[in-house]
Image: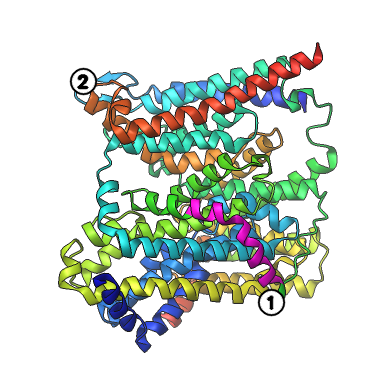
Amino acid sequence: MRMAELVMAVVMAVFSLYLMWKSAELPIGWIPGEGPGGGAWPFWLATGMLLCCIATVYRWARRLTPESRSEDVYMDSRAFKLFLLNAGALAAMIGLFHIVGAYGAIPAFLIFYLRFMGGHSWRLTGTFAVVTPVITFLFFEIALQKTLPKGFTDPWFEPIFDFFY
Amino acid sequence: MEILSLLLNGFAIAFEPLNLALIIFGCAVGLFIGAMPGLGSVNGVAILLPMTFLVPPTSAIIFLGAIYYGAMYGGAISSIMLGIPGASTAVATTFDGRPMALQGKADKALVAAAAASFVGGSIGVVLFTLFAPPLADIALGFGAPEIFALMLMAFATFVGLGGDDVAKTLFSIFIGLVFGAVGLDIISGEPRLIFGDIPGFFHGINFLVLAIGIYGIGEMLWTIEISKGNVVVSQASVSVKGILKNLVELTRTWKAMLLGSFLGYFVGILPAAGATPGSLMAYGFAKQMAKDPETYGKGNINGVVAPESANNAASTGAMLPMLTLGIPGSPTTAILLGGMVIWGLEPGPMVFIDHPDFVWGFIASLYAANLFSLLINIAFIPAFIWVLKLPFTILAPVIFILCIVGGFVPTLSMHDVWLMLIFGIVGYLMRKLDYPMAPAVLAIVLGPLAEPALRQSLLISGGSFSIFFTRPFSSVFMFIAIALLVLPLGKQALDARRRKTERT
């Protein structure tokens, strides 16, 4: 935990420096007749972020924060595996949105999560994998008219929309 | 007496069969829309506005007002049950509502949210009825310095939200404000902070993306880790007796309810502010004024009551400048205003004289909508509790899907969905190191309001910060803000000195 505290503060300090540099693409000083330049607000806020990171590193060195005194592991192997499985499955589902669309990605994610991670029966898994996208479609696309991504399956939905409209 | 007679006439209009049916239907629809992550009152009112062309203008605004109210109630449901803010106005409800649900007190949190919404809405509508013109005058007298000072005061209360580590809390505020600055510079119109020249950043970072990322995905990852994958979601049960007992216990939270109601109502009146800043500020102030601030964020019922009463009071307050001056106080009232124009009504002071039936029918309907939203909300609590009893391996993927779809719907952009995943993962990793996440979410909401106010103020004063200390309202807000910022720092210094003394 102690090392993680330092690494996070340093990474965030570097990110703050990047934000300062990025903000300075617009004027950060006073422009006569216009007031503060467009980059001033984010530049000074990023400076504030950097100062906070420096304060955190200082407090880490002095062992003033509970994390800087902690001997615990930041993430044990089981937690890391669970994190990777969940975050990975989410990333894969979002990636699939681009290819097979929401109505292909959602059932795939549900089958993976319910059947292989949750150990539920095929009947329950199948029910959720079918009912969830149908409800999502009816609520978002038909009732609220919010179109979700469909990837290459887009033309398949034309008859359904023709039916409703 | 004249107001009373006009109000009674308004009740006669509101309780006509068509209008009453529209109130009940609007409350139910609003409750459902508000409970859906990513959708709030603004979506509900916008989507259903075309339907109102089928009924007279008075019935139309009564229907939209009922949706607005229902959505305000509904926003709390997914905040408490799933840990995903149902609407921006319910972000602050997540802070304590979700921990309460995880502790098996979901029924208590839901009853508290409903009752606080009712109290906030009732106080809001009474204030609306009695003090509309003078309050509108005060709020609309606010210029850029007052608005910035008010925002600074809100940020100062956030320092108290983050526990003892002031540096991490301030970092969280700053990073939220920077994310709020992404997009186009409001004055020059030039692109700003467009990371990697990715086009998706041109429309800025929608705060719901950050909120759902942190409180949806991040919260789920956190829950899965601390439970090692074996989550017991909630042992909450519900009964009529239990609901009544919870209602009686709520009398102890009257201070937070009143604070939220009055603060929320006043913030709601401010143009471009609305219910979201109102609820966040109410949470911050409730924590600052509490005797047990360390319990906030861990399931303190006052942390549910304050923002819920505030967002309902603010939603009523936001209608005040809309009706009296034709200036909307929130995005939803902007759409209501548009509706009034389409119905052939001109918002402003004359509407009270030219169309008293419309105005007073609408005001009376707010009383009714408030009551029906409460009843419908409480009636549905058993259904909400049932959802919580599902096994976590069923609930988790459904919540993840709601997060993804909820993150996509506001802007219809996959860029935002990826960003949400990144925020969720980074937020989870930072939370493990005790970085408070709430201030970042609050800052990204208030940032786009604070920056133009600061820049306009400095432009007026020629670059001098003294403008904030020479105007009566702004100077009061500034001094309170400074006090709120200095107090935690002083406390930290005293604690450090005490520890040093104890060691020696």
Q: Which residues are magenta?
A: B242-260
Between B240 and B334, the residue placed more toward the observer is B240
Magenta stretch contains residue B250: yes
Which residue does the numbered mark 2 point to in the structure image?
A: A32
SS at circle 2: loop
Chain for disc number 1: B
Between B412 and A38, the residue placed more toward the observer is A38
Magenta stretch contains residue A148: no
Q: Quadrant of residue B150?
A: top left
Q: Is residue A98 visible?
A: no
Q: Please, what is the three-letter code of the amino acid marked with disc 2?
A: Pro
Quarter in which the N terminus of chain B is drawn: bottom left
Q: Residue at x 27, y 68 (%)?
A: B339
Q: Residue at x 55, y 29 (%)?
A: B170
Q: Quadrant of residue B198?
A: top left
User: Is B480 placed above or below B62 here?
Assistant: above
Which residue does the numbered mark 1 point to in the structure image?
A: B240
Q: Please, what is the three-letter code of the amino acid marked with disc 1?
A: Val
